[in-house]
Amino acid sequence: RPIAMFKEYPTDKPLTEYIEAEASKVPSIIQKITRLSWEDAVILTTYMVACLYGNSKPVPILFVTGPMGSSKTSLSRLIKDCIDPSEGGMFALSENLKDIAIATSKRLLCVFDNTGGLKNKKKLSDLLCTVVTKGSMQMRTLYTTKDETVLQFCSNIVINGIDYLAEQCDLLNRCIMIELDTIPEEERKTEKQMDIEIKKAMPELLGGLYAI
């Protein structure tokens, strides 16, 4: 029986039609719509290509950190729209482990936005480690006394926030980090301007990613 690689949900957006592009141009395309260095653009390119392979292999968690006004959310939205476009998918990082398990069971990529950090949150850190390598959670089936439901979850994850986001060794070993600088006031763009630039660049960006 073949494995289903795609599953449609009501919140999914239409996939962007790509155009043929050279793989070597992807970091430059990313730099045009972000303020990433060449090295970070290459890291991000590698991360997005790994995500496009689905959940067949573990992919490190991407931490995006930086001060207020460094475009963390815009960068996270670019990644989300490229890999798994949907109306949802940008969440607050709940300390309710069940909520995290449900969210990561339904999506190829989850973005946890404006996170306050994971210090002193070992159970949450451990669960995120499990999400990367595929995990499961047993819970009582609704409206029953003895029946159990096993929820399987696995997803690629992007977490952004101002603070240094992790301190648990197991989680640090499963993550890569991109640190952003504050954007000068006169160079900042509105959310609408960023959306326009992302939409314009997306066909060529996807074409380059697919060519790698």
Image (spheres, rainbow, N blue to C red):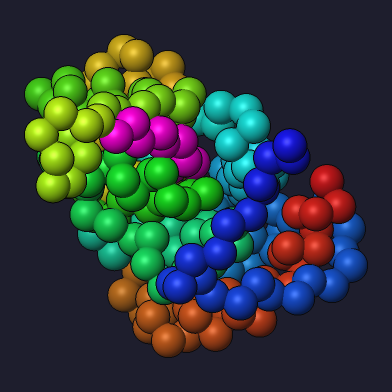
Residue at the image point whose x is 31% and y is 75% from the top: 185
Q: Please report the residue visible at 22 percent of the width from the left and 54 percent of the height from the top.
A: 92
Q: Dividing the image into 4 quarters, which one contains the N terminus?
A: top right
Question: Closest to the observer: 183 or 29?
Answer: 29
Residue 170 image offset from top left, x and y in percent: 34, 14
Q: Residue at x 41, y 44 (%)?
A: 105
Res. 36 visible in picture: yes
Q: Is residue 37 left or right of residue 103?
A: right
In the image, is residue 80 above or below residue 156? below
Camera sees residue 177: no
Looking at the rendered structure, the number of numbered marks drawn on it comes to 0
Looking at the picture, how far across and down is residue 179, in whole percent?
40, 43
Q: Nearer the viewer, residue 17 or 37?
A: 17
**Could you say where residue 97 lies in the image, as x and y percent from the top left?**
19, 36
Residue drawn at the location 52% of the way across and 49% of the way down: 108
Q: Answer left or right for 205 relative to 147.
A: right
The magenta span reads 149-157
Q: Main secondary structure of the magenta part?
A: strand
* In the image: residue 63, left or right of residue 30: left
Question: Vertically, is 89 above or below 63?
Answer: below
210 vs 21, nearest the viewer:
210
Location of residue 206 in the rendering, given as x and y in whole percent from the top left corner: 73, 63
**Residue 154 falls within the magenta-colored stretch:** yes
Q: Is residue 6 above or below residue 10?
A: above
Residue reaching furthest to the top: 169
Is 144 magenta? The answer is no
